[in-house]
Image (cartoon, rainbow, N blue to C red):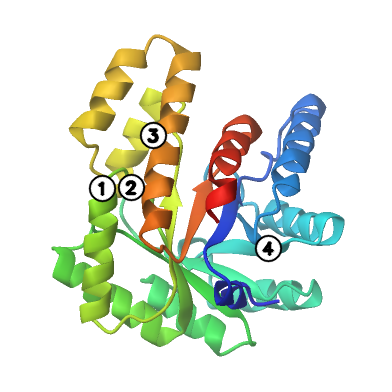
Amino acid sequence: MKVVNCFKERPVISFEIFPPRPNASEKAIERFYDNLDVLANLKPAYISVTYGAGGSDNKSGTLDLCRYVKKHYGIEVVPHIPGINFTKAKVKSYLAELKASNIDNILALRGDLPEDGQIKGDFQYASDLVSEIKQDGDFNILGACYPDVHPEAKDSVDDIKNLKCKVDAGVSQLITQLFFENEHYYQFLERCELANIDVPVQAGIMSVVNERQIKRMATMNGVSLPPKFLRMMKHYQDNPVAMRDAGTAYAIDQIVDLLSEGVDGVHLYTMDNPVVTQRICGAIETLI
């Protein structure tokens, strides 16, 4: 099933998960699948699966996990494809594997630039990858977007122009990068409307459990951290349990506000953490 059809009944709640690392221990893999049982039991509309783990080039891990989720839980899956890791020939081969596995959805990404900043594959931009996928099968293609503006864009106008190119190339729904100021999301939606970008836009939400990790991700993705959020992290930085609980409360507050404003959906960056995801889903259950 194409997950864009889920938006006929809004709002859509979905999850992102990471596959286990290729060198993970048996105990770590067992723990991962125990956590996955909990996440699947929360009945997300779909689950997106990152490409490899920790930046590894391991498409088999992504594909195997997608097949497992679809078969074992009956939940639709969305594998990530970072164009920076693919040649045209590799994309064609991978798409054939997805078709054979009855996977109808793809999250098409440019991917993070290597340290030298040189793209060695065939896809300079995500829109190039989207165009390639559109030529080879009837897939539902998802794309990424940035309420806080893509870190490589000159400004918000340049960012929206590039996003428009991606949507025009064949993207039928969008998932935002994580953000911590809802007003930035609402302003982003206004820019989309002005640019005639008329596809569902899910808000990507991550609950903070680790100060160093979230600061690193925010820096990489050009995400602004509001004063309220920074005060929270500073106050609880030496208490991991309190940090987790405060981060969960912050995420819930964001989602409640988004739902009250009629958001198309929320995509939870679960970090494979079932405890936090359970708490968030439990808190918003009656609001959906």
Which residue bears the numbered disc 1? 222
Q: What residue appears at the point 85 percent right and 61 percent down from the top-left corner?
A: 71
Give x and y (percent) for residue 265: 48, 61
Q: What residue appears at the point 79 percent right and 25 percent down from the top-left corner?
A: 27
Number of the front mark, 4 or 2: 2
- SS class of the residue under badge 2? loop
Q: Is residue 24 above or below residue 224?
A: above
- SS class of the residue under badge 1? loop
Q: Amino acid at mark 3?
A: Tyr
Whether residue 113 is visible here, answered yes or no, is: no
Q: What residue appears at the point 39 percent right and 40 percent down from the top-left corner?
A: 253
Tell me the CA gap for discs 1 and 4: 28 Å
Which residue bears the numbered disc 3? 250
Check the picture and name the quadrant holding the N terminus: bottom right
Mark 4 residue crowding within 10 angstroms, few (<14) / some (14–19) / many (20+) = many
Q: Is residue 217 above or below residue 125?
A: above
Give x and y (percent) for residue 164: 30, 80
Q: Amino acid at mark 1?
A: Gly
Which residue bears the numbered disc 4? 77
Which residue bears the numbered disc 2? 179
Number of the front mark, 1 or 2: 2
Quarter where residue 219 is shown: top left
Tell me the CA gap for discs 3 and 2: 12 Å
Camera-nearest residue between 30 and 276: 276
Mark 2 residue crowding within 10 angstroms, few (<14) / some (14–19) / many (20+) = many
